[in-house]
Image (tube, helix red, strand yellow):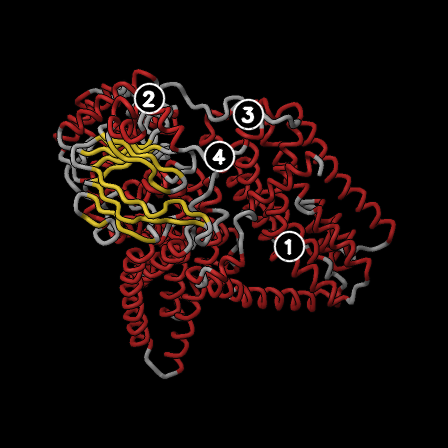
Amino acid sequence: MSRFGSLVRTALRVNFGLSLFRPREILRRKRDLWMIPLIVLGAASLGPVLYFYLKIIRTVHGWLAPTGQQAVLITAAVLAGQVFVFIFGFYYVISAFYFSRDLEILVPLPLAPAQVMTSKFAVILTNEYLTIALLVLPVFVSYGLLEGAGAGYWLAAGLVYLFLPVIPLAAVGLLVVGLMRVANFSRKKDVLIIVGSLILMTAALGGQLWLGRSAGASPDPEAIARIFASSDGFVRSLGAKFPPSLWATKIVAGGSAGEGLKSAALFFGMSALLFVGLVAAAGKLFYGGLVGLGETSGRKKALGRRALAGRLSSGRRPVRAVFLRELRIMNRTPIFLLNGVLSVVLIPVLFALMAKTGSGRSDIAGILKALGSANPVASVLVSALFMAVSGCLNGTSSSAFSREGGQFWLSKVIPVSPRDQAKGKFLHSYAVAVLGIVAAAAVIRFTVRPAASVMAAAAAYSAVGAVALTSLGMMIDLARPLLNWTNPQKAIKQNLNVLLAVLADLAFFGLLFLLAKFLGRAGMSAAAAMAVLFALLTVLSAGSYRLLLAFADKRYPQIE
Amino acid sequence: MIELRNVSKSYAKGRVKAVDDLTLTVRPGEIFGFLGPNGAGKTTTIKMIVGLLKPDRGTVVVAGFDVRKEPLRAKAVTTYVPDTPAVYERLTGLEYLNFIGDVYGVSKKDRLARIEKGLEVFELSSAVGSPIQSYSHGMKQKIVLIAALLPAPRVMVLDEPMVGLDARSAHHMKNLLREHCQGGGTLFFSTHIMEVAEKVCDRLAIIHKGRLVAEGTMAELRSRNGTKESLEHIFLELTET
């Protein structure tokens, strides 16, 4: 195998932990068998989501087919996939190119900078194929089946899928390589991640507002007529914001052969151009940006006797100590901060912007206001759901143990019982959830303006429910903590436990919804049904918290 | 103070025996050196003493507490320094020391006195307010050592504590450890540096392929092997494959 081939193969093995993956061992070692139903359950819970997604695609296709505009489905899927890759690719690119620890091994090897960087690009590309599969493939497959497409379609769709992440990833790569070389952030990697993320988030929010404004503006009848008059009017209208999605649509499902070839030349040409540009930039700039890798500021902070004494506590307080440790490590690790604390604030803010981008009574806030005044019970439940989703659907609780990584040995040797450690971690995760609940409550207050009683009831439901959801997330992470990571991103963004916990949370919401429906059908009054739901939530929360503590006692000694 | 009775540990479903029927006693107030070639089972043994690994067979007793049956009591009297100083890089040195003080329940007065002494001896006062991620390898090793001394434990278990320390720091560390044992503490440490083991340890054990091949004072080892040679010579002879 060539040197470069071996490099890529090794990088992929490390990224996916293939050397550690031993399915036969799991079957033989009975103590790991519990993972199989968990994985099956996790995969099965994707079923309903996929089912609804496919149903939506089919319905939209049915709406658009009579006017011949159905190819806009492909445009939308490609656009969504590429925007997704662009936003999330930033974290992957920056951590893989500059902050992964294997660079200390790779840089001294007789490999060209472009080879090292290309191997990392290959790994991110593979990750992206998996990440966008659920978003893009259902559209490509449904479209092909519904249109009765021939071999040409499937070939073109396959090729477009393979090249789909290249343009956004190469663009992000160029941006990062250039930024690192010019600003030499390598000694301030935390600053780079936070500043870069804020820039991207601002861009995403700005884009959201811009799209919302243009959609919300009073429609021009002539423009609408033009869209419907042309068979690719929708495609052109949507693709105008991001031409590669238009080219991709033309390759897969577009018009004449000549137009298809022209689009293919543009799409693949642009991909190749950006990739070659990235490789060229890597050859010149990559190692330059790495200067100082692993170095930190030489300035150290001394403390006098009085300052030292002032900062010391006294006596034994293990739960508080674990809580403070969690808080500090989470808030000082940019990847953890962005995915945990910041996301609980960002979700409600995004919602607020979405709710405000429409006009008059057609906006989301208006719809919710109308819903609230018509049905206060639904208003409480929807608000509570929004608060709970904002507070709990992030990776804080479901990476509570994984975040310790290689330092988990400390938790094993300190004289603190596993249940006390779990209490400290729970307090931290719950505090983050409460922050999300408060942020969501503020957004509801300023957009929907429900009655104070509705707000209080929703806050109570979500605060109690958050105990169960936090415990559930922590138990999932404790069952299979990911401790051997070398890049903090793996502990939270690429941790399967986070996804499993989100799916479990969705199942939890689904069960509560079914129960509420059942109580309604059983003829129970709204007030009584609400009381039953609250009581059940309280019991579930108390039970799951106790279960978490008991599970910690059982599980800690087993983790080696 | 530390007792290992018929302790065994294997990996790869029993195919690799890391520690094989090891029986060992470390007396109170003793500095006990644990030697062996790479892969002999030193770190596995140490990890079983501090509760990081579970023995397949046998018992480990620390200060009268079975580490499996009464883990918290055993941990409350033990501190551990691993072979690589993997500590919370996002905390400052002081925050880490305070964390250790909190979980072991050290009073503020003792905390201040012991931290000040440790920082002074290891010349770390100027860095204690900075995040550990800005420390060099040796500085991280020093902060872990100061943390291990902070609770004034009855038992200290150290895995290759000299690695990464400069000559001055290694000298200070030996003095501190000797002081710790003079105050009644017990020390169990592994090392590859024969001179240090020979000079510092009251008693020694040599482990090879998971089995104990020698145990005793330096004089006892010499007399058993019928030699007046150095520990290095005895070690090489006993661990020849």
The subunit carrying tag 2 is: B
Tell me, for residue A290, which label it has, or none.
3
Instruction: Looking at the picture, tell me which residue is in the foreground, A434 or A546.
Output: A546
Label 4: few (<14), some (14–19) or many (≥20) C-alpha neighbours in 10 Å: many
Label 4, on which residue? A193
Q: Which residue is mark 1?
A: A219
Alpha-carbon distance for marks 2 and 4? 55 Å
Tell me if B214 is positioned left or right of A494 in this view: left
Q: Is residue A151 visible?
A: yes
Give the mark nearer the N terminus: 4 vs 3.
Answer: 4
At a point 44% along the width and 59% down the height, the residue shown is A32
Which mark, by number, is residue B230? Answer: 2
User: Which structural element holds mark 4?
Assistant: helix
Q: Are marks 1 and 2 in contact (CB under 8 Å)?
A: no
Drawn side of residue A222 relative to residue B45, left or right: right
Where residue A530 sits, quadrant-wise, is: bottom left
Q: Amino acid at mark 1?
A: Pro
Chain of the residue where label 1 is placed in the rendered structure: A
Q: Nearer the viewer, residue A49 or B129?
A: B129
x and y, in percent, of residue B202 in the image: 22, 28
